[in-house]
Amino acid sequence: MKKISLYLLLSLAVLTSCKDKLAPVSPDAIQPVVVTEQTVFDTDDPAIWINKKDQTKSLVIGTDKENGGGLYAYDLQGKIVRQFVDMARPNNVDIAYDFPYGEGVIDVAVVTERNANAIRIFKLPELVPIDGGGLKVFEGEATEEYNEPMGIALYEKEEGDTKVFYAIVGRKNGPAQDYLWQYTYQTHADGKVALQLVRKFGAYSGKKEIEAIAVDRELGYVYYSDEVEGVRKYYADPVKGNQELAFFAQTDAKRDHEGIAIYKKDATTGYLVVSNQQDNSILIYPREGEANNPHEHRLITTIPVAAIECDGLEITARGLDPRFPQGMLVMMSNGKVFHYYDWTKIQEKIDQAKKK
């Protein structure tokens, strides 16, 4: 009995200690329309798959970050409708449409599997793997943490009559330069999907890690969070070079700059949204930059949200159903869940900030 009592006391002490470390949620925080069902371990990063035939049947694809975790598909009500589990610590996920495979094209989710030193590719919406068990990344790196993939963002560009599919991958640790590796992924004649390394690029402060990556496909830029330092911007197209175009948000976050996503008002304007993790808020920047400098991204406003210590987030500007008429923001939150937010509420806050 004494052993059991002592165990209970220690457990309560640990829970209390963890609770004390959590940042408080602001009373002015925007509340989610939907909170998803829980996963087993620890949600981390979402992506949004748009169902082209019926947008109301679109899915949120999210990772459960732990050995034994996996990839989950949620409907717009937050219910888990599919899952692929027993993975070696899946981390981040992104989605591409119309990927050539077999005799046609499919939509895919591409996921980093950190403890397998690989990325995984799944056919959507079925969550069926098509990668033969995983495709290795960061091969040849001598240091263990240098080959542990974490962040990922996908990019496509037209080359003549074909489309080239790229995966830009970040990792747990790496050198001060060439932290990100960019690969093409394609289906070969034998039906197998393979990677080819095309470039290494990207500066790193060395202070924490680089996990969150987002690509603006229309404008051709890639953004990533150098977590405690700020957000860096480069060209997404390898042929345009490896020069850093911007390094912003350096003094805007409480500590960690985490998830990055892009709200697209049209082909060239909108907002860059960054998770301010320890503040339980999001940072809003102009996607198009300033009138005289497209690479100058000044903070528009900080908006408190109910999501607690958000790692990853994603946005669509499409009105998926009447609850999300101007689009939806999805955010990871503590509690093994994701939150769905109505963009209308966020836009109201942005408009108020612009009037001040």
Image (cartoon, grey):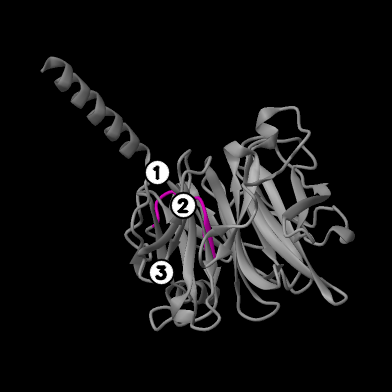
Question: Is residue 47 or residue 291 the one in the foreground?
Answer: 47
Q: Looking at the figure, which quarter contains the N terminus?
A: top left
**Residue labelled with disc 3:** 75
Q: CA distance from mark 1 to mark 2?
A: 15 Å
Specify the principal SS of the magenta part. loop
Q: Amino acid at mark 2?
A: Cys
Q: Residue at x 72, y 63 (%)?
A: 155
Of pointers 1 and 3, the one earlier in the residue sequence: 1
Question: Is residue 171 or residue 75 the one in the foreground?
Answer: 75
| Drawn side of residue 202 relative to residue 252, left or right | right
**Residue labelled with disc 1:** 41
- Eyeballing the image, is 155 above or below 148? below
Q: Which residues are magenta?
A: 307-314
Q: Amino acid at mark 3?
A: Asp
Does dot 2 land on a helix, a strand or a loop? Answer: loop
| Drawn side of residue 311 relative to residue 197, left or right | left
**Residue labelled with disc 2:** 310
Residue extending farthest left: 1
